[in-house]
Amino acid sequence: MRLKIDRETLLRGVGRTLGVVDRRGTMPILANFLLQTDENRVIISATDLEVSFRGFYPAEVQEHGALTVQAHYFYNLIKELPGETLYLEGTENSNLKIQMGDARYQLHGLPADQFPPVPEITDQELVQVESGMVKEMIEKTIFSVSADDLQYHLSSIFWERVGIPRLDPAPDQPLEEGVEPELDYWLRLISTDGHRLTLIERPLAESGQFPMDKGILIPRKGMAEVIRFLAEEEKVSLGLGKQSLALKADDRYLFIRLLTDKKFPDYRRIIPESFTYRFAINRRLLFDTIRRIALLSTERFKGVILKLMPDHLEVTFNNPEVGEGREVVGLLMEQGDPGGLPMEIGFNARYFLEPLNAIASDMVLLQVNEKDRPCCLADQTDPHYLSIIMPMSL
Protein backbone atom coordinates (compact mmCIF):
# COMPACT_ATOMS: atom_id res chain seq x y z
CA MET A 1 0.00 0.00 0.00
CA ARG A 2 1.26 3.44 -0.91
CA LEU A 3 -0.75 6.67 -0.95
CA LYS A 4 -0.79 10.43 -0.42
CA ILE A 5 -3.55 12.07 1.63
CA ASP A 6 -4.46 15.42 3.18
CA ARG A 7 -3.57 15.41 6.88
CA GLU A 8 -6.81 17.07 8.05
CA THR A 9 -8.88 14.60 6.02
CA LEU A 10 -7.06 11.68 7.61
CA LEU A 11 -7.42 13.19 11.07
CA ARG A 12 -11.19 13.46 10.65
CA GLY A 13 -11.45 9.86 9.59
CA VAL A 14 -9.23 8.36 12.26
CA GLY A 15 -10.70 10.70 14.89
CA ARG A 16 -14.11 9.11 14.32
CA THR A 17 -12.69 5.72 15.33
CA LEU A 18 -11.35 6.80 18.73
CA GLY A 19 -14.63 6.31 20.56
CA VAL A 20 -15.20 2.96 18.87
CA VAL A 21 -11.91 1.10 19.28
CA ASP A 22 -11.52 -1.12 22.33
CA ARG A 23 -8.27 -0.27 24.15
CA ARG A 24 -8.83 -2.47 27.21
CA GLY A 25 -10.19 -5.63 25.64
CA THR A 26 -8.57 -9.03 25.27
CA MET A 27 -8.26 -8.75 21.47
CA PRO A 28 -5.37 -6.37 20.64
CA ILE A 29 -6.57 -5.84 17.07
CA LEU A 30 -9.74 -4.14 18.36
CA ALA A 31 -7.52 -1.22 19.46
CA ASN A 32 -6.57 -0.80 15.79
CA PHE A 33 -8.35 0.81 12.88
CA LEU A 34 -8.41 -0.83 9.46
CA LEU A 35 -6.90 1.22 6.61
CA GLN A 36 -7.79 0.05 3.10
CA THR A 37 -7.39 1.59 -0.36
CA ASP A 38 -10.24 1.78 -2.85
CA GLU A 39 -9.53 3.43 -6.22
CA ASN A 40 -9.00 7.14 -5.41
CA ARG A 41 -9.92 6.95 -1.72
CA VAL A 42 -9.17 5.15 1.53
CA ILE A 43 -11.59 3.25 3.74
CA ILE A 44 -11.17 3.73 7.49
CA SER A 45 -12.96 1.21 9.70
CA ALA A 46 -13.11 0.39 13.41
CA THR A 47 -15.12 -1.95 15.62
CA ASP A 48 -15.34 -3.27 19.16
CA LEU A 49 -17.85 -5.92 18.01
CA GLU A 50 -20.70 -3.81 19.48
CA VAL A 51 -20.17 -0.50 17.65
CA SER A 52 -18.64 -0.25 14.17
CA PHE A 53 -17.63 2.69 11.97
CA ARG A 54 -16.70 2.88 8.30
CA GLY A 55 -15.81 6.02 6.36
CA PHE A 56 -14.56 6.76 2.84
CA TYR A 57 -12.07 9.60 2.34
CA PRO A 58 -10.36 10.98 -0.80
CA ALA A 59 -6.70 10.10 -1.34
CA GLU A 60 -4.16 9.74 -4.13
CA VAL A 61 -3.61 5.97 -4.20
CA GLN A 62 -0.41 4.79 -5.85
CA GLU A 63 -0.49 1.17 -4.73
CA HIS A 64 -3.39 -0.75 -3.21
CA GLY A 65 -3.27 -2.60 0.08
CA ALA A 66 -4.66 -2.89 3.61
CA LEU A 67 -3.38 -3.08 7.17
CA THR A 68 -4.37 -2.17 10.74
CA VAL A 69 -2.69 0.31 13.11
CA GLN A 70 -3.33 1.31 16.73
CA ALA A 71 -5.81 4.18 16.43
CA HIS A 72 -4.86 6.38 19.40
CA TYR A 73 -1.10 6.28 18.80
CA PHE A 74 -1.58 7.04 15.10
CA TYR A 75 -4.03 9.89 15.73
CA ASN A 76 -1.90 11.54 18.42
CA LEU A 77 1.16 11.43 16.17
CA ILE A 78 -0.55 12.74 13.02
CA LYS A 79 -2.18 15.54 14.99
CA GLU A 80 1.23 16.91 15.99
CA LEU A 81 3.02 16.59 12.65
CA PRO A 82 3.48 19.88 10.75
CA GLY A 83 2.43 20.25 7.13
CA GLU A 84 -0.61 19.47 4.99
CA THR A 85 0.15 16.26 3.08
CA LEU A 86 1.03 12.81 4.44
CA TYR A 87 2.70 9.97 2.60
CA LEU A 88 1.77 6.50 3.86
CA GLU A 89 3.32 3.19 2.86
CA GLY A 90 2.61 -0.29 4.11
CA THR A 91 5.29 -2.92 4.55
CA GLU A 92 5.14 -6.67 4.00
CA ASN A 93 4.84 -7.30 7.74
CA SER A 94 1.87 -4.87 8.05
CA ASN A 95 3.82 -1.97 9.50
CA LEU A 96 2.96 1.55 8.35
CA LYS A 97 5.58 4.07 7.25
CA ILE A 98 4.60 7.72 7.70
CA GLN A 99 6.36 10.60 5.99
CA MET A 100 5.72 14.33 6.18
CA GLY A 101 8.54 16.62 5.09
CA ASP A 102 11.67 15.50 6.86
CA ALA A 103 9.74 13.55 9.50
CA ARG A 104 9.82 9.75 9.22
CA TYR A 105 7.92 7.32 11.45
CA GLN A 106 7.01 3.66 11.35
CA LEU A 107 4.19 2.16 13.43
CA HIS A 108 3.70 -1.55 14.06
CA GLY A 109 0.49 -2.94 12.65
CA LEU A 110 -1.41 -6.20 12.28
CA PRO A 111 -2.59 -7.91 9.09
CA ALA A 112 -5.89 -6.75 7.66
CA ASP A 113 -7.21 -10.32 7.34
CA GLN A 114 -7.23 -10.60 11.15
CA PHE A 115 -9.61 -7.66 11.50
CA PRO A 116 -13.23 -8.60 12.37
CA PRO A 117 -15.81 -7.98 9.61
CA VAL A 118 -17.62 -4.62 9.76
CA PRO A 119 -21.38 -4.65 8.99
CA GLU A 120 -22.65 -3.24 5.71
CA ILE A 121 -25.90 -1.73 4.52
CA THR A 122 -27.43 -4.25 2.13
CA ASP A 123 -31.18 -4.29 1.63
CA GLN A 124 -32.19 -2.15 4.62
CA GLU A 125 -34.79 0.52 3.94
CA LEU A 126 -33.22 3.88 4.81
CA VAL A 127 -35.23 6.68 6.41
CA GLN A 128 -33.84 10.21 6.49
CA VAL A 129 -34.21 12.08 9.80
CA GLU A 130 -33.18 15.41 11.27
CA SER A 131 -29.97 14.83 13.21
CA GLY A 132 -30.75 17.52 15.77
CA MET A 133 -34.08 15.95 16.68
CA VAL A 134 -32.69 12.45 17.26
CA LYS A 135 -29.70 13.89 19.14
CA GLU A 136 -32.08 15.81 21.41
CA MET A 137 -34.09 12.65 22.10
CA ILE A 138 -31.01 10.70 23.13
CA GLU A 139 -29.58 13.48 25.29
CA LYS A 140 -32.92 13.84 27.09
CA THR A 141 -33.10 10.13 27.99
CA ILE A 142 -29.53 8.84 28.34
CA PHE A 143 -29.09 10.18 31.91
CA SER A 144 -31.57 7.65 33.30
CA VAL A 145 -29.85 4.64 31.72
CA SER A 146 -28.52 2.21 34.33
CA ALA A 147 -24.79 2.34 35.06
CA ASP A 148 -24.87 -1.35 35.99
CA ASP A 149 -23.45 -3.20 32.98
CA LEU A 150 -24.73 -6.49 34.38
CA GLN A 151 -28.28 -5.29 33.68
CA TYR A 152 -27.84 -4.99 29.93
CA HIS A 153 -31.53 -4.36 29.30
CA LEU A 154 -31.43 -1.35 31.65
CA SER A 155 -28.05 -0.02 30.46
CA SER A 156 -29.66 0.65 27.09
CA ILE A 157 -32.23 2.95 25.51
CA PHE A 158 -35.37 1.37 24.10
CA TRP A 159 -36.40 2.66 20.65
CA GLU A 160 -39.95 2.07 19.52
CA ARG A 161 -42.15 3.15 16.64
CA VAL A 162 -45.65 4.06 17.79
CA GLY A 163 -48.64 4.79 15.61
CA ILE A 164 -50.97 7.55 16.78
CA PRO A 165 -54.38 7.87 15.04
CA ARG A 166 -54.44 10.98 12.93
CA LEU A 167 -57.08 13.50 14.00
CA ASP A 168 -60.04 13.49 11.64
CA PRO A 169 -60.05 16.91 9.91
CA ALA A 170 -63.83 16.66 9.57
CA PRO A 171 -65.34 15.42 12.86
CA ASP A 172 -68.83 15.60 11.41
CA GLN A 173 -67.85 13.00 8.83
CA PRO A 174 -66.78 9.91 10.79
CA LEU A 175 -64.91 7.06 9.15
CA GLU A 176 -66.97 4.38 7.46
CA GLU A 177 -67.44 1.16 9.37
CA GLY A 178 -64.49 -1.18 8.93
CA VAL A 179 -62.14 1.59 7.75
CA GLU A 180 -59.05 1.95 9.90
CA PRO A 181 -57.98 5.51 10.80
CA GLU A 182 -54.76 6.79 9.29
CA LEU A 183 -51.80 6.81 11.63
CA ASP A 184 -49.08 9.33 12.29
CA TYR A 185 -45.89 7.49 13.22
CA TRP A 186 -43.70 8.71 16.07
CA LEU A 187 -40.31 7.60 17.30
CA ARG A 188 -40.33 6.97 21.06
CA LEU A 189 -37.22 6.56 23.24
CA ILE A 190 -37.43 5.24 26.80
CA SER A 191 -34.75 4.64 29.43
CA THR A 192 -34.88 3.42 33.02
CA ASP A 193 -32.48 2.31 35.74
CA GLY A 194 -35.20 0.81 37.92
CA HIS A 195 -35.56 3.96 40.05
CA ARG A 196 -36.74 6.44 37.40
CA LEU A 197 -37.97 6.32 33.81
CA THR A 198 -37.65 8.91 31.05
CA LEU A 199 -39.75 8.98 27.87
CA ILE A 200 -39.62 11.23 24.83
CA GLU A 201 -41.37 10.96 21.48
CA ARG A 202 -41.14 12.94 18.28
CA PRO A 203 -42.92 12.66 14.91
CA LEU A 204 -40.95 11.31 11.97
CA ALA A 205 -42.29 11.97 8.50
CA GLU A 206 -40.98 8.71 7.06
CA SER A 207 -41.06 6.59 10.20
CA GLY A 208 -43.87 4.45 8.78
CA GLN A 209 -41.16 2.78 6.70
CA PHE A 210 -39.04 2.06 9.76
CA PRO A 211 -39.90 -1.46 11.06
CA MET A 212 -39.61 -1.00 14.83
CA ASP A 213 -43.03 -2.08 16.04
CA LYS A 214 -41.51 -4.47 18.61
CA GLY A 215 -38.81 -2.01 19.60
CA ILE A 216 -35.03 -2.28 19.70
CA LEU A 217 -32.47 -1.95 22.50
CA ILE A 218 -29.39 0.23 21.89
CA PRO A 219 -26.53 -0.04 24.47
CA ARG A 220 -25.23 3.04 26.29
CA LYS A 221 -21.86 3.11 24.47
CA GLY A 222 -23.66 2.86 21.15
CA MET A 223 -25.84 5.82 22.11
CA ALA A 224 -22.79 7.93 22.93
CA GLU A 225 -21.33 7.21 19.49
CA VAL A 226 -24.65 7.98 17.83
CA ILE A 227 -24.63 11.41 19.51
CA ARG A 228 -21.13 12.08 18.16
CA PHE A 229 -22.16 10.96 14.70
CA LEU A 230 -25.31 13.09 14.68
CA ALA A 231 -23.43 16.18 15.89
CA GLU A 232 -21.48 16.29 12.63
CA GLU A 233 -24.46 16.22 10.24
CA GLU A 234 -27.76 18.05 9.66
CA LYS A 235 -29.48 14.94 8.34
CA VAL A 236 -28.73 11.24 8.57
CA SER A 237 -30.40 8.13 7.24
CA LEU A 238 -31.42 5.30 9.57
CA GLY A 239 -31.63 1.66 8.56
CA LEU A 240 -32.56 -1.39 10.62
CA GLY A 241 -31.12 -4.84 10.03
CA LYS A 242 -31.60 -8.07 11.95
CA GLN A 243 -28.58 -7.45 14.15
CA SER A 244 -27.79 -3.74 14.00
CA LEU A 245 -29.03 -0.18 13.65
CA ALA A 246 -27.26 1.62 10.80
CA LEU A 247 -26.70 5.37 10.41
CA LYS A 248 -25.50 6.82 7.11
CA ALA A 249 -24.26 10.34 6.33
CA ASP A 250 -22.67 10.81 2.91
CA ASP A 251 -19.79 8.29 2.84
CA ARG A 252 -19.73 7.60 6.57
CA TYR A 253 -21.50 4.74 8.30
CA LEU A 254 -22.10 3.83 11.93
CA PHE A 255 -23.47 0.44 13.02
CA ILE A 256 -24.77 -0.34 16.51
CA ARG A 257 -25.30 -3.98 17.44
CA LEU A 258 -28.75 -4.54 18.91
CA LEU A 259 -29.37 -6.32 22.21
CA THR A 260 -31.59 -9.12 20.98
CA ASP A 261 -31.33 -11.53 23.93
CA LYS A 262 -32.69 -9.11 26.55
CA LYS A 263 -36.18 -7.71 27.05
CA PHE A 264 -36.95 -4.16 28.14
CA PRO A 265 -39.43 -3.78 31.04
CA ASP A 266 -43.08 -3.10 30.23
CA TYR A 267 -42.74 0.65 30.72
CA ARG A 268 -46.45 1.31 30.15
CA ARG A 269 -47.21 -0.36 33.49
CA ILE A 270 -44.81 2.00 35.26
CA ILE A 271 -46.37 5.25 34.03
CA PRO A 272 -49.51 6.13 36.04
CA GLU A 273 -52.62 6.64 33.94
CA SER A 274 -53.62 9.74 35.92
CA PHE A 275 -52.53 11.95 38.80
CA THR A 276 -54.45 13.43 41.72
CA TYR A 277 -52.36 16.60 41.96
CA ARG A 278 -50.65 18.78 39.37
CA PHE A 279 -48.42 21.73 40.26
CA ALA A 280 -46.71 24.25 37.99
CA ILE A 281 -43.29 25.38 39.27
CA ASN A 282 -40.60 27.64 37.86
CA ARG A 283 -38.05 25.17 36.53
CA ARG A 284 -34.95 27.28 37.19
CA LEU A 285 -35.94 28.10 40.77
CA LEU A 286 -36.67 24.46 41.56
CA PHE A 287 -33.45 23.28 39.95
CA ASP A 288 -31.28 25.82 41.78
CA THR A 289 -32.97 25.10 45.10
CA ILE A 290 -32.50 21.33 44.92
CA ARG A 291 -28.95 21.75 43.59
CA ARG A 292 -27.96 23.92 46.56
CA ILE A 293 -29.47 21.59 49.13
CA ALA A 294 -27.89 18.59 47.40
CA LEU A 295 -24.46 20.10 48.09
CA LEU A 296 -24.84 18.71 51.62
CA SER A 297 -25.52 15.18 50.41
CA THR A 298 -23.18 12.20 50.77
CA GLU A 299 -23.30 8.64 49.47
CA ARG A 300 -25.21 7.56 52.58
CA PHE A 301 -27.55 10.57 52.72
CA LYS A 302 -28.69 11.79 49.31
CA GLY A 303 -32.45 12.18 49.63
CA VAL A 304 -34.38 15.45 49.85
CA ILE A 305 -37.89 15.90 51.19
CA LEU A 306 -40.45 17.85 49.16
CA LYS A 307 -43.33 19.18 51.26
CA LEU A 308 -46.16 20.16 48.91
CA MET A 309 -48.50 22.98 49.97
CA PRO A 310 -51.30 24.67 47.96
CA ASP A 311 -49.15 27.72 47.15
CA HIS A 312 -45.55 26.74 47.87
CA LEU A 313 -43.10 23.89 48.11
CA GLU A 314 -40.70 23.32 51.01
CA VAL A 315 -37.47 21.53 50.16
CA THR A 316 -35.65 20.16 53.20
CA PHE A 317 -32.59 18.02 53.78
CA ASN A 318 -31.02 16.53 56.90
CA ASN A 319 -27.62 14.88 56.83
CA PRO A 320 -26.39 13.83 60.31
CA GLU A 321 -22.83 13.82 58.97
CA VAL A 322 -22.92 17.38 57.52
CA GLY A 323 -25.95 19.46 58.53
CA GLU A 324 -29.42 20.42 57.36
CA GLY A 325 -31.15 22.90 55.05
CA ARG A 326 -34.57 24.26 54.12
CA GLU A 327 -35.75 26.41 51.21
CA VAL A 328 -39.16 27.50 49.90
CA VAL A 329 -40.26 27.69 46.25
CA GLY A 330 -43.58 29.15 45.10
CA LEU A 331 -45.91 27.04 42.96
CA LEU A 332 -49.35 27.05 41.36
CA MET A 333 -51.67 24.15 42.11
CA GLU A 334 -53.54 23.42 38.86
CA GLN A 335 -55.32 20.25 39.96
CA GLY A 336 -56.20 18.54 43.23
CA ASP A 337 -57.92 19.01 46.58
CA PRO A 338 -56.04 21.41 48.91
CA GLY A 339 -57.51 19.46 51.82
CA GLY A 340 -55.15 16.58 51.06
CA LEU A 341 -52.11 18.77 51.65
CA PRO A 342 -49.46 19.10 52.96
CA MET A 343 -47.85 16.00 51.46
CA GLU A 344 -44.23 15.04 52.13
CA ILE A 345 -42.33 12.91 49.63
CA GLY A 346 -38.65 11.90 49.68
CA PHE A 347 -36.59 11.71 46.48
CA ASN A 348 -33.03 11.21 45.37
CA ALA A 349 -31.92 14.74 44.51
CA ARG A 350 -30.04 13.69 41.36
CA TYR A 351 -33.16 12.05 39.95
CA PHE A 352 -34.83 15.47 40.01
CA LEU A 353 -31.87 17.55 38.87
CA GLU A 354 -31.16 15.61 35.67
CA PRO A 355 -34.62 15.87 34.08
CA LEU A 356 -35.00 19.48 35.30
CA ASN A 357 -31.76 20.29 33.50
CA ALA A 358 -33.02 18.61 30.31
CA ILE A 359 -36.46 20.27 30.23
CA ALA A 360 -36.52 23.31 27.95
CA SER A 361 -39.48 25.39 29.13
CA ASP A 362 -39.52 27.94 31.95
CA MET A 363 -42.23 26.06 33.85
CA VAL A 364 -42.27 22.41 34.85
CA LEU A 365 -45.27 20.31 35.85
CA LEU A 366 -44.95 18.19 38.99
CA GLN A 367 -47.69 15.55 39.16
CA VAL A 368 -48.23 13.26 42.15
CA ASN A 369 -50.77 10.85 43.63
CA GLU A 370 -49.62 9.73 47.07
CA LYS A 371 -46.36 10.05 48.99
CA ASP A 372 -45.31 6.44 48.38
CA ARG A 373 -46.14 6.38 44.67
CA PRO A 374 -44.13 7.64 41.66
CA CYS A 375 -44.30 11.28 40.65
CA CYS A 376 -44.02 12.75 37.17
CA LEU A 377 -41.93 15.70 36.00
CA ALA A 378 -43.06 17.06 32.65
CA ASP A 379 -42.28 19.98 30.36
CA GLN A 380 -45.25 22.35 30.49
CA THR A 381 -44.92 23.13 26.78
CA ASP A 382 -44.00 19.62 25.61
CA PRO A 383 -46.49 16.87 26.50
CA HIS A 384 -44.27 14.33 24.73
CA TYR A 385 -41.42 14.47 27.26
CA LEU A 386 -41.67 13.25 30.87
CA SER A 387 -39.76 11.62 33.72
CA ILE A 388 -41.24 9.20 36.24
CA ILE A 389 -39.39 9.18 39.58
CA MET A 390 -39.80 6.65 42.38
CA PRO A 391 -39.93 8.04 45.96
CA MET A 392 -37.41 7.19 48.68
CA SER A 393 -38.05 6.12 52.24
CA LEU A 394 -36.31 8.70 54.46
Image (tube, helix red, strand yellow):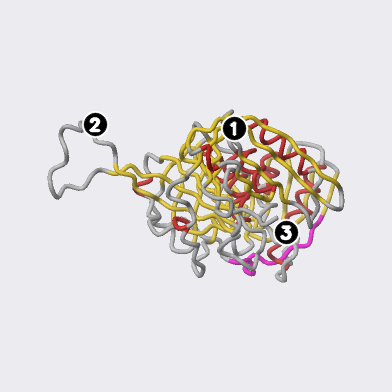
Q: Label 3 vs label 2: CA separation?
A: 60 Å
Instruction: State whether residue 36 appears in this view.
Output: no
Instruction: State whether residue 322 appears in this view.
Output: yes
Residue 60 on the magenta segment? no
Residue occupied by mark 1? 281
> What segment carries the magenta color?
106-116
Residue occupied by mark 3? 69
Q: Residue at x 70, y 70 (%)?
A: 27
Q: Residue furthest left?
A: 177
Q: Amino acid at mark 2?
A: Pro
Q: Quadrant of residue 1?
A: bottom right
Mark 3 and 1 residues: CB-CB less than 8 Å, in contact? no
Q: Report x, y in % for residue 112.
A: 64, 64
Q: Report x, y in % for residue 382.
A: 48, 35
Q: Report x, y in % for residue 240.
A: 44, 55
Q: Residue at x 58, y 61 (%)?
A: 154
Closer to the camera, 279 or 344?
344
Instruction: Name which of mark 3 and mark 1 comes first in the sequence.
Output: 3
Q: Quadrant of residue 233?
A: top right
- Secondary structure beneath dot 3 equals strand
Residue occupied by mark 2? 169
Q: Label 3 vs label 1: CA separation?
A: 54 Å
Closer to the camera, 360 or 293?
293
